[in-house]
């Protein structure tokens, strides 16, 4: 029993001696640093990123008005990846949920800086003045540097939303010919630097936000 313990102690001592000798040599640290530096490359080669989302169409030029009363459109978004959502400030059902999801995207894409932008289009532009949109934006802590809320003349809004982003908006027919409830698309649309739609996300899907953040990062960081 004592001989086995002694042998074990001798083995441990030899290992410690070899390790101490190796650590004291500069070559050990050169090899170690090289291995650590090369590990990300090895990991990327064994875990290639998913392919970029396919091109779904091109967003035509539009010019609307943001929550600060300034002209805003495709010119200001040129060269940036952006994601669009569709809301109106009087909505008490799906719009708050959509905006909260976009607030999560805003928080999780801070690292993309000015290369990524969020855009919320009001589908009730007659009511949603810049002042109302600004108040709505503040209630969700929207950063005006990275998130814009757009309204403007109804025909221009409709052209951008329906004609450009291929998203439904309008009013249902009410009684006696009066305007009824507002309806609109409840998804998010990702657009690349060249103004091309790349993916549509169902906000109710549990993986939607993760997918959008990942796709946006890929589009921002891809080689032009």
Image: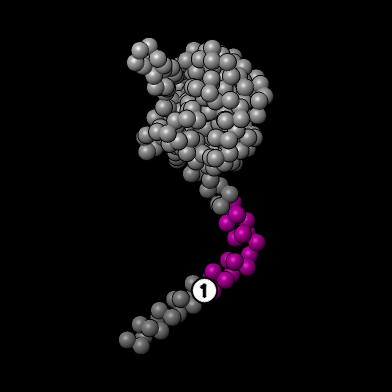
Q: Main secondary structure of the magenta part?
A: helix
Q: Position of residue 56 (x, y in %)?
A: 46, 18
- The region drawn magenta spans 16-34
The residue lying at 56 percent from left, 14 percent from top is 156
Q: Position of residue 140 (x, y in %)?
A: 53, 40
Judge from the rendering whether residue 29 lies leftward or rightward of residue 185; answer left or right: right
**Dot 1: element:** helix
The quarter of the image holding the N terminus is bottom left
Whether residue 25 is in magenta: the answer is yes
Q: Residue 210 sits in which quadrant?
A: top left
Q: Is residue 192 visible?
A: no
Q: Which residue is mark 1?
A: 16
Judge from the rendering whether residue 97 lies leftward or rightward of residue 75; answer left or right: left
Q: Is residue 186 above or below residue 26?
A: above
Q: Is residue 166 above or below residue 25?
A: above
Query: Exactly how many numbered labels are in the figure?
Result: 1
The residue lying at 62 percent from left, 22 percent from top is 65
Q: Position of residue 30 (x, y in %)?
A: 62, 56
Q: Is residue 204 visible?
A: yes
């Amino acid at each position: 029993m004592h001989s086995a313990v002694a042998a074990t102690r001798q083995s441990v001592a030899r290992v410690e001696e070899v390790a101490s000798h190796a650590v004291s040599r500069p070559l050990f640290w050169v090899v170690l640093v090289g291995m650590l530096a090369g590990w990300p490359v090895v990991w990327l080669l064994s875990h290639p990123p998913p392919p970029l989302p396919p091109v779904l169409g091109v967003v035509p030029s539009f010019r609307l008005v943001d929550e600060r009363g300034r002209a805003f459109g495709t010119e200001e978004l040129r060269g940036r990846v952006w994601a669009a959502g569709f809301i109106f400030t009087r909505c008490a059902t799906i719009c708050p949920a959509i905006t909260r999801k976009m607030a999560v995207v805003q928080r999780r894409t801070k690292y993309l800086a000015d290369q990524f932008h969020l855009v919320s289009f009001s589908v009730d532009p007659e009511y949603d003045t810049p002042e109302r949109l600004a108040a709505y934006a503040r209630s969700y802590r929207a950063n005006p540097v990275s998130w814009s809320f757009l309204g403007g003349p109804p025909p221009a809004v409709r052209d951008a939303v329906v004609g450009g982003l291929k998203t439904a908006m309008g009013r249902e027919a009410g009684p006696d010919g009066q305007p009824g409830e507002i309806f609109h698309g409840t998804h998010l649309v990702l657009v690349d630097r060249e103004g091309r739609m790349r993916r549509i996300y169902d906000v109710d899907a549990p993986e939607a936000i993760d997918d959008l953040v990942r796709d946006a990062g890929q589009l921002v960081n891809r080689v032009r």
